[in-house]
Image: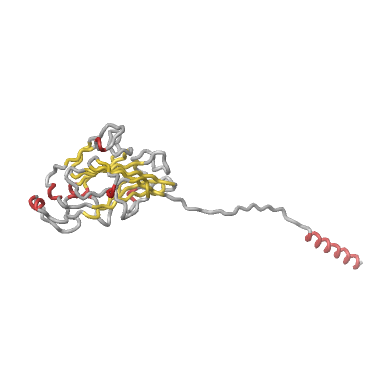
């Protein structure tokens, strides 16, 4: 009787081993290689066209007009005039183009000098006898600006009167260590009409800037095919009191344009940008 039981047990053990040797599992593998995350880009390019008293500044060593490019600090100058006189004016229209991603855009100005340089006889006779440093000149008190969203022709037109970005006198702008920031298009303001700067737009964006040695009067021209040679849309009056105090003075400034992504940044405002 014991032998029979042992025999059955032996058969059962062999059967169990045989089952384990022939088993398999249903399975499937799908493999994808080369998965990456690549950071997006924003590339703001700037173009510029400058006119001085109605004459285009687009040739020779004083070239202040260029197509879209990356602005290089210390080498790219929007305008530079050494013999600026009362009643003189400069108009420059900046082209903004952003690649790869839609963006908000801001503009900032910092005064780097507003110097007296020296005091000549005419300044003395006008009551100017100060010579105290880099920011004691009177030119900045007689240099006014007007910024607007332009259509690209460098002329302030009657259909652009509702697109005034800023206007004022240069003397109140911040000096080194700070900056005046202007919103061009952010979550609270849009001067260009597309909600934000569209990447690679069919039509680029333009900011007109008018600078006057004297007082500015708006004189918007009829919208159409215009150039500053036929009228800038402003009148610059250099007959202002005590303007002789500005003789020999200079004003220099740093100008910055800033673009920041709009995607996942929908509440951005230029007031939060620190140049």
The residue lying furthest to the front in this view is 60
Q: Residue 242 location, x and y as percent?
A: 12, 47
Q: Residue 72 location, x and y as percent?
A: 34, 53
Q: Which of 111 and 70 is in front in this view?
A: 70
The residue lying furthest to the bottom in this view is 2
Q: Which of 173 and 95 is in front in this view?
A: 95
The residue lying furthest to the left in this view is 125
Q: In this view, does 201 lie to the left or right of 183?
A: right
Q: Residue 66 location, x and y as percent?
A: 33, 46
Q: Nearer the viewer, residue 240 or 270?
A: 240
Residue 168 quadrant: top left
Question: What scheme was used to colour the molecule?
Answer: secondary structure
Q: In this view, does 261 lie to the left or right of 5?
A: left
Q: In which quarter of the image is the N terminus?
A: bottom right
Q: Judge whether residue 115 can be spotted in this image.
A: yes
Q: In this view, does 25 lie to the left or right of 258?
A: right
Q: In this view, does 200 lie to the left or right of 248?
A: right
Q: Residue 266 location, x and y as percent?
A: 41, 46
Q: Judge whether residue 161 can be spotted in this image.
A: no
Identity of the residue drawn at 28% across and 33% down: 158
Identity of the residue drawn at 12% across and 48% down: 244
């Amino acid at each position: 009787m014991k032998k029979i039981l042992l025999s059955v047990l032996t058969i059962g053990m062999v059967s169990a081993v045989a089952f384990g040797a022939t088993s398999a599992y249903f399975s499937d593998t799908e493999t994808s290689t080369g998965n990456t995350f690549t950071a997006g880009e924003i590339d703001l390019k700037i173009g510029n066209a400058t006119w001085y008293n109605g004459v285009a500044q687009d040739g020779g060593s004083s070239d202040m007009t260029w197509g879209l490019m990356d602005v290089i600090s210390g080498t790219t100058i929007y305008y530079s005039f050494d013999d600026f006189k009362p009643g003189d004016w400069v108009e420059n229209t900046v082209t903004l183009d952003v690649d790869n991603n839609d963006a908000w855009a801001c503009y900032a100005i910092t005064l780097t000098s507003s110097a007296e340089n020296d005091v000549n006889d005419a300044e003395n006779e006008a009551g100017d006898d100060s010579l105290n440093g880099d920011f004691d000149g009177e030119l900045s008190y007689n240099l006014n600006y007007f910024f607007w969203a332009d259509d690209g022709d460098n002329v302030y037109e009657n259909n652009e009167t509702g697109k005034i970005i800023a206007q004022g006198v240069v003397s109140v702008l911040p000096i080194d260590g700070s900056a005046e920031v202007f919103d061009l298009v952010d979550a609270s303001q849009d001067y260009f009409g597309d909600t934000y700067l569209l990447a690679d737009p069919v039509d680029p964006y333009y900011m007109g800037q008018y600078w006057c040695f004297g007082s500015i009067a708006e004189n918007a021209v009829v919208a159409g095919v215009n150039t500053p040679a036929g009228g800038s849309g402003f009148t610059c009056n250099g007959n202002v009191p005590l303007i002789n105090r500005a003789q020999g003075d200079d004003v220099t400034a740093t100008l910055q344009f800033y673009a920041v992504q709009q995607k996942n940044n929908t509440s951005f405002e230029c007031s939060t940008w620190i140049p």
